[in-house]
Image: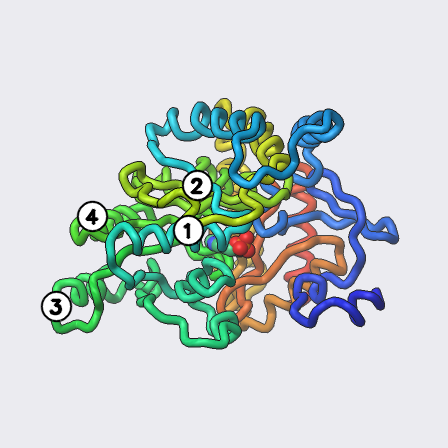
Amino acid sequence: MEIFDTRESAVRSYCRAWPTVFDRAAGSWLYDTDGRAYLDFFAGAGALNYGHNNPALKAALLDYLSDDRIIHSLDMHTVAKREFLTAFDELILLPRQLDYRVQFPGPGGANAVEAALKLARKATGRTQVVTFTNAFHGMTLGALSVTGDSFHRAGAGLPLAHATPMPFDGALNGTTGDFAWLEHLLANRGSGLDDPAAVIVETVQGEGGIRVASPEWLRGLATLCQRHGILLIVDDVQMGCGRTGPFFSFETAGIRPDLVCLSKSIGGFGLPMALTLIRPDLDIWQPGEHNGTFRGVNPAFVTGTAALRTYWHDDSLERSTLAKGQRIAAALAALADSVPGVAIRPRGRGLAHCLAFADSGLAGKVRTAAFERGLLVETAGPDGEAVKLMPPLTITEADLGQGLELLADAVRSVC
Ligand SMILES: Cc1ncc(COP(=O)(O)O)c(C=O)c1O
């Protein structure tokens, strides 16, 4: 472990919660150098929806590598990119009657967000972006400016401007009409809010502590945006690619965002890749106006294509995600009830769930107790109060049951 302590930056964090050296992984399991097994209820923060070293994806990647095919290509045409775009068109966009131009903005989620923010401002000629309490959109300056968390914002080193936070669904406990304040600001010429270019929203806030927006709230937001000529950006970096059931998390609400950000599991295998999906008439970029060296990671196109062809040719993954999600919701409700005297709220949708502790300090203790039992769970939320459960969508029922038992044991030991 010494080399990490002496050489790696102090910024490292996940390794502090899980102090071991991981080496191998398969499906929902990781193994450390001592051969100890850990059940993964973290799944690369949503980058491993199809599990570790998924055999179908790995086979496609190994074939591609062994034939000396193109690895790096900026935004040049390659066979791997053509196959990815074709599969994305055939299996994702066309069946959902969605029409988007696909931008490859650079490999991370923050790249997808930056591109969406820049394009929204360019297309509308406006600068302000409306964001929501507890939102998380990434660490680059533009993405950070629309992120809520004060700890991360403080790392910017300069004022984060041109973003206006509003209460997310449920933030005011239903005591005030959902969009009353935003409507008031938009309607009042003396409000001080410049006409916004866009609203950026997560349908389920991941890093914010698995806060779920209702379909009604999302529809209300989409209608408000339309009425005021504001572009709607859905950041589906963490909740897209089937995490909440359907491929896009906004499908349940039946809304059509103007811009969509995807990353994490879009490459399928944990390889870096991101997309910004653009309503066609908004695709007003000049060639090369937004560029980057790693916009054509062909191995990620290959595994991304294999993931789409393996898991999205029908709705069986979506159905199994929803069924497993119901099983988790029931188990978490029972678990919360089984520790009287400790205020715990289960929340979630699809295969993104959490246990939110009123006493935020308990969540970190549960994470440690889970690790000691061989279960990886992360904490989320502004005070780290939520123990977050995001297993691979492909997890077996047996592994899911085992993980829930380990979690229950960890919670009871702490509470
Ligand atoms: C909703 C959302 N948007 C953007 C990001 C940033 O993605 P990345 O860390 O790949 O830049 C994340 C990362 O967790 C996220 O959850």
Q: Secondary structure at mark 1?
A: helix
Residue drawn at x 60%, y 45% is 272
As measured in the structure, the alpha-carbon distance from the residue carrying label 3 to the one carrying label 2 is 36 Å
Q: Amino acid at mark 2?
A: Gln
Please identify, in this view, whether the residue under mark 1 or under mark 4 is nearer the observer: 1
Lower sequence index among marks 1 and 2? 2
As measured in the structure, the alpha-carbon distance from the residue carrying label 1 to the one carrying label 3 is 30 Å
Q: Amino acid at mark 3?
A: Asn
Please state the horizontal and vertical placement of residue 388, each as a whole percent of the image.
Answer: 56, 56
Q: Amino acid at mark 4?
A: Gln
Lower sequence index among marks 4 and 2? 2
Q: Is residue 301 above or below residue 21?
A: above
As measured in the structure, the alpha-carbon distance from the residue carrying label 1 to the one carrying label 4 is 21 Å
Please identify, in this view, whether the residue under mark 3 or under mark 2 is nearer the observer: 2
Please state the horizontal and vertical placement of residue 210, each as a whole percent of the image.
Answer: 48, 56
Mark 1 touches mark 4? (CB < 8 Å): no
Q: What residue is disc 1 on?
A: 115
Q: What residue is disc 4 on?
A: 226
Lower sequence index among marks 1 and 4? 1
As measured in the structure, the alpha-carbon distance from the residue carrying label 4 to the one carrying label 2 is 23 Å
Q: What residue is disc 3 on?
A: 188
Q: Quadrant of residue 413?
A: bottom right
Residue 123 is marked as none
Residue drawn at x 38%, y 25% is 94
